[in-house]
Amino acid sequence: MMKSVFGCVLLMLVGCTPQENVKTAVARQVQLKTFNLTYLPGDMPVETPLLLKLDTGKEAVLAVKGVIRGKTMYMGEIPLRFQLKQQQWQAELMLGACTEPRMLWQLDLEVTYQNGETTKLQDVFYSRWPD
């Protein structure tokens, strides 16, 4: 009898404890020429604020422009506005949801150096539906 009462009390306590569905925002890093690109979070959930960071190291970079286009399905173009923050170029974005739970996207970047030269960078990545 005592075991069943203890079991019921324990079950009630566990049932009343708030459970948080905590996920770590694991970053995905990609090497593009001499630059390091980081996606945060790395699994790129749709309809969620996302962050791209481009570490240009000691390169004399004047500006970074970018655009994201859907590859699995046409979703228009998502322009990226990069700003220099904490010695990294950063852009905030949000991806739209597709009918597919996992969608392929293409990122096109143009880096302008202080001497006026430019270089183009490209990466593809998948997004996912949020949990």
Image (spheres, rainbow, N blue to C red):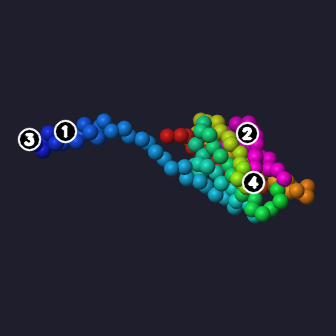
Between residues 30 and 92, which one lies in front from this camera angle?
92
Q: The residue under label 2 is which amino acid type?
A: Ile
Return the x and y of residue 25 as percentages of the image width and height.
Answer: 54, 49
**How far apart are the two marked residues, 3 and 1, measured between alpha carbons?**
11 Å
Q: Residue furthest front?
A: 86
**How far apart are the two marked residues, 2 and 4, measured between alpha carbons?**
15 Å
From this view, report whether residue 110 is shown above or below residue 69: below
From this view, report whether residue 83 is shown above or below residue 57: above
Q: Which quadrant of the structure image shows residue 118?
A: bottom right
Please indicate whether residue 3 sits to the left or right of residue 41 in the image.
Answer: left
- Report which residue position mark 4 lands on: 122
- Report which residue position mark 1 lands on: 8
Q: Secondary structure at mark 1?
A: helix
At horizontal 33% and vertical 39% (from top left) the residue drawn is 17
- Report which residue position mark 3 lands on: 1
Can you say which quadrant of the picture contains the N terminus? top left
Q: Residue furthest right?
A: 116
Graded by Cα atoms within 10 Å as few (under 14), some (14 to 19) or many (20 or more), the crowding at tag 1 reads few
Q: Is residue 74 magenta?
A: yes
- Report which residue position mark 2 lands on: 78
